[in-house]
Image (cartoon, rainbow, N blue to C red):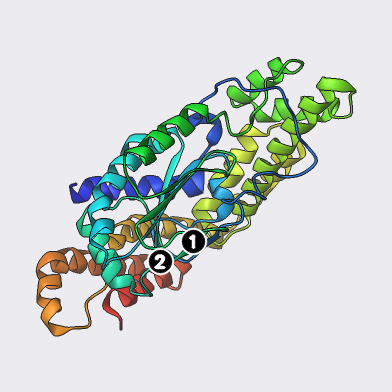
């Protein structure tokens, strides 16, 4: 895979976390009419209870970002020949099915060797999220590679060695994956409201659900179920709007203002956007981060400088010119936006690559 293609894919991962909207990307098959509002089955699923380690490659990831997605999680190691052999196939799966709701995650299982692991993965075209580790509940398997395919409900639909059975499980899970906000029910009484959700009119749908959530029978059940999903999604956006990334804050507030117009979520987001429009410090940080993000994407494709001298010559031959270009961009960022969070993070990227 060409470096530019990997850059674009990584940038799409950044956008997945900062600006992803399941309303626009989801499949929408019909499902059974059963409704369960007493608890949160996804949170209690094996995926919901899986512990995720540090992100080594890819955007910031929280487990809640995986809700409603089909997830392929592979435990692998850089000293495992079968694991290394599967990297191009996992990359192909991500490229082919990522827009349909598949999230590919590789969790390292052979120690905290970030530099070596990333060097092996990136050289073989990895374009998916790589973590330092992952712990799946009730995993009794031994050895790696070991994969888990989770459906949109967080349930394991395949567990074992990567291969054709894994691929078939992924395709089947994607076909059954409903719209993330509508879930696994067939809307009998609120079909028009469900149509609003499909059209991205979440504010109108939200208000209709609030109006009908206490109604008797199927109407109330459908309204309460959909309202819970809409609130969960809006609260997730609110959480992102309170984060440290100015780009993520702006995207989340804009999404809330647009999608949840005429609701308390939309009104609050609009008020916060108006305040930020007059915040000169925030606007400077926003400009700086927009410069920083492409630098971070480019830096992510360069593994850390090896500690052994024998390996450094190879590293310099492969990555030296690109690293020099990144250093020049970091210097420019510091000159244009000194003492910003983006400038500090850019310097940290250089330190992380060089180990200095």
Identify the disc placed on residue 4.
none
Disc with the residue nearer the chain's start (1 vs 2)? 1
191 lies left or right of 288: right
Quadrant into which the C terminus falls: bottom left
Quadrant for residue 194, please give it. top right
Which residue is painted at 82% across and 30% down in the image? 210
> Which element carries disc 2, helix, strand or loop?
loop
Residue 335 screen position, x and y as percent: 34, 69
Q: Position of residue 91 (x, y in %)?
A: 29, 46
Instruction: Give whichever of 233, 189 is nearer the camera.
Output: 189
* Image location of residue 245, percent across then percent down: 52, 58
How many callouts does the rendering have? 2
Q: Which residue is mark 2?
A: 337
Sort mark 2 into few (<14), some (14-19) or many (20+) by Cα contacts within 10 Å: some
- Which type of secondary structure does the marked residue at label 1 adopt? helix
| Residue 63 appears in view | yes
Residue 329 in view, yes or no: no
Q: Is residue 67 above or below residue 286?
A: above
Q: Residues within 10 Å of mark 1 (few under 14, many from 20)?
A: many
Q: Is residue 191 above or below residue 18?
A: above
The reply, left or right, for residue 180 in relation to residue 120 is: right
Residue depicted at 39% across the width and 38% down the height? 98
Residue appearing at x 64%, y 38% in the figure: 257
In this view, the residue in front, 324 or 223, is: 223
Residue 173: % across, % down: 48, 33
Residues at marks 1 and 2 touching, judged by CB atoms closer than 8 Å: yes
Between residue 282 and residue 157, name the one nearer to us.
157
Residue with the mark numbered 1:
285
Q: Is residue 157 left or right of residue 233?
A: left
- Tell me which corner region of the image, top left, top right, bottom left or bottom right, holds residue 195: top right
**Distance between the alpha carbons at the discs numbered 1 and 2:** 8 Å
């Amino acid at each position: 895979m060409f470096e530019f293609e990997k850059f674009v894919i990584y940038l799409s991962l950044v956008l997945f976390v900062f600006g992803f909207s399941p309303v626009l990307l989801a499949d929408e098959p019909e499902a059974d009419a059963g409704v369960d509002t007493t608890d949160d089955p996804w949170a209690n699923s094996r995926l919901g209870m899986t512990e995720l380690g540090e992100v080594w490659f890819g955007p910031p990831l929280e487990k809640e970002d995986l809700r409603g997605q089909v997830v392929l999680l592979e435990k692998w190691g850089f000293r495992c020949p079968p694991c290394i052999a599967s990297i191009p196939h996992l990359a192909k799966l991500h490229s082919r099915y990522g827009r349909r709701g598949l999230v590919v995650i590789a969790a390292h299982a052979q120690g905290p060797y970030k530099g070596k692991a990333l060097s092996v993965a990136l050289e073989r075209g990895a374009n998916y999220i790589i973590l330092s580790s992952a712990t799946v509940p009730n995993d009794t398997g031994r050895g790696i590679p070991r994969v888990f395919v989770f459906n949109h409900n967080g349930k394991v639909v395949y567990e074992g060695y990567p291969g054709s059975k894994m691929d078939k499980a992924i395709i089947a899970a994607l076909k059954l994956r409903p719209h993330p906000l509508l879930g696994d029910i067939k809307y009998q009484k609120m079909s028009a409201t469900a149509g609003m959700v499909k059209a991205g009119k979440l504010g109108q749908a939200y208000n209709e659900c609030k109006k009908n959530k206490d109604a008797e029978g199927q109407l109330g059940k459908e309204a309460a179920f959909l309202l819970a999903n809409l609130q969960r999604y809006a609260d997730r956006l609110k959480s992102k709007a309170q984060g440290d990334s100015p780009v993520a804050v702006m995207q989340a507030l804009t999404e809330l203002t647009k999608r949840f117009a005429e609701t308390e979520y939309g009104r609050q987001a609009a008020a916060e956007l108006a305040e930020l429009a007059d915040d000169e410090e925030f606007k400077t940080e926003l400009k700086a981060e927009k410069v920083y993000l492409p630098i971070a994407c480019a830096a992510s494709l360069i593994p850390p400088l090896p500690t052994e001298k024998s390996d450094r010559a190879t590293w310099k031959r492969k990555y030296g010119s690109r690293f020099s270009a990144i250093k020049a961009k970091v210097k420019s960022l510091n000159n244009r936006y000194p003492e910003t969070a983006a400038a500090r993070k850019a310097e940290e990227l250089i330190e992380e690559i060089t180990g200095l």
